[in-house]
Amino acid sequence: MVQNKKAPPTSMELQHEIEQFLYNEAALLDDWQLEEWLTLFTADGTYFVPTTDFPEGYPEPHLALIDDDMTRLTGRVKRLLSRHAYREYPYSRTRRMISNIRVTGAEGDDLQVTASFIVYRIRMGQVAPYVGKYLYTLTRENGDLKIRHRRAVLDLEGLWDHGAVSIIL
Amino acid sequence: MELDQLIMDDPEQGLFRVHRSTMTSEEIQRLEQERIFDRSWVYVGHESELPNPGDFIRRRVANRPMFFVHGKDGKLRPFLNTCRHRGAMVCRQDYGNAAAFQCFYHGWTYDNKGDLIGVPDEEGYAPAFDQSELGLMQPPLVEQYRGFYFACFDRNAQSLDSYLGDVKVFLDIVIDQTEGGIRVLPGPVRYAIRANWKLLVENSVDGYHVPTTHQSYMQYLKDQGVSMTEPKGRSWGMDIGHGHGAFSGRERSAGQYGGVIDHFTDDVKVRLDKVKAQQVHRYGEEREDWAPGRVNFLVYPNMVFVGKTTLRTIWPVSPGLMEITGWAIVPKNESAEEQQARINEIPLFQGPGGFASPDDLEALESSQLGYAATEVEWNDLSKGMDRAPKPDDELQMRAFWRQWQADMLGLPQARNMHDLTKSASS
């Protein structure tokens, strides 16, 4: 889980393609284009947010904040768009800052990518930043990049300012 | 508003109202600390969190910094996390294992039994300075019930056993869900809600809000083909005594074991059904619906079990802010794979990233904001006051408030022990 090792050489083209992919993804999320966002995943895609005590993972079975396969993630998006996800309806405003994008590994078509994020959530007079890092496994389908695993690891010690992870991080 | 006027409890008329200043007043918050949290038995931790000598966890209990340690003598002790010298916290990590705890300020050192074993430049102290009296302090009373450790800051309080009373049966049902007992897992969810702590207490045993607040979660279950048919078993709300309360949701396939049970392997389902049968046998015909149903219950004042899968504590920070910690509970004798299958179900419904809890947060914060309209003075909790209690009635909340009132007024017991008697026979 610790990905501080020196990244393998990455071509400028690949770096550029990955950056554009992540920026586009962030724009979809900030614009609440969640159904379109879902199409970025492979059929076996996952989205995971660990709890805040063990950001680097924990060897034994443990609770997660979010542990979605595509069935659950599709349900999450449907719920968020249903107008009955009251924490997010009316929708919050979000703004994502994504940086420090690095390719940290490659095997076959799979690329390991990390990035830092700050996701601001603004609603009901509160501005709360989620701070953390993404760990992606990206892959290729018909030449396009797709998300196989997407892990949003919070640096927060608890959701003291946020209460919930009611948006997609 | 006088303290004894804050609750309007009229069983004859079937009306129960709570004044909204209970949710907003700094003075009431101060009195709650003094009369409820400093006098009740409050949850500290579970023995399974400290399997080995030297293991420790740090947490806040009743607004005090504490840490809970497995001593080298095998005893588990909650300590007040403050150096006897000048006050700095001697335990500065949330988890770990240590033979000794050294205060970094001046270097006083305590072993994991709490004894003061090292004082730099000891020669500087007069003979009257007695190191043996300066070990880490514990709460005045510490007791456990089958691995659940509680503390009480009132040394004259009744025993834990008598305080828990009938809620022990519900704890047994959680503990005995398989033959091997349970573990409370490390790595809980931690979050805050901008609302009064009592709103989450109410919400945790509230069946009434489920169809509306959680309709999008219900829709998800329907989309997954989960049967949402009406119950075959009974469902109810319950005043367990001493402020403890429970409700049993309708027996749906979802929730029976904490989630969508289709995800469990047949092998696990067979085993769980066997345990269910054992529990029905153990707890008898009358209570058979306690075991298999989805039961949420409150251990007064602020410990909540949601189903048999999670445990949370709710601590006030200020009248409009609370902090919550929620732990997963798993049976010890299941494989890591089976445990993970259970745990994977928890964040679907519950917790800050779930399909339901965020909407509870929104409801509670929305209520708290509503209380700024002080012309509207009363909350209503009358539902079901003159009938046999159903899970979506509010008896279990009235039970909490009646004990709350008794504690705040210093009464030996609640003024009204029950709703109107005519419901008792129905």
Image (spheres, rainbow, N blue to C red):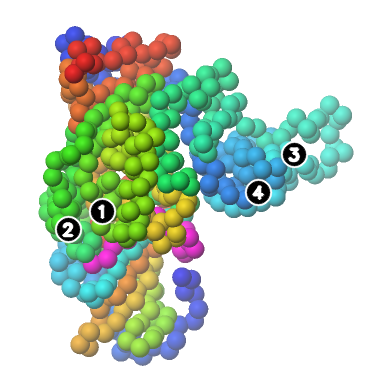
- Tag on residue B116? 3
Residue lying at 25% horizontally and 53% vertically, measured from the top left: B260
Secondary element at tag 1: loop
Indicate the secondary structure of the residue bearing disc 2: loop
Estimate the spatial distance between the alpha carbons at disc 3 and disc 1, rounded to whole Å: 51 Å
Give the alpha-carbon distance from disc 2 to disc 3, as whole Å.
58 Å
**Residue at 23 percent of width and 11 percent of height:** B421
Foreground pick, A15 / A52? A52
Q: Is residue B119 left or right of residue B172?
A: right
Foreground label between 2 and 4: 2
Between discs 1 and 4, the one toward the N terminus: 4
Q: Left or right of B114: which side holds B37?
A: left
Q: Position of residue A34 (x, y in %)?
A: 17, 64
**Disc number placed over residue B224 in the picture, else none:** 2
Q: Residue at x 19, y 9 (%)?
A: B12
For the residue marked with disc 2, what is the amino acid? Gln
- Can you say whether B157 is above or below B245 in the image? above
Q: Chain of mark 1?
A: B
**Magenta stretch, residue numbers:** A54-70
The percent position of residue B71, horizontal first and vertical second, equals 67, 43
Type of residue at label 4?
Pro
First reached walking from the N terminus: tag 3 or tag 1: 3
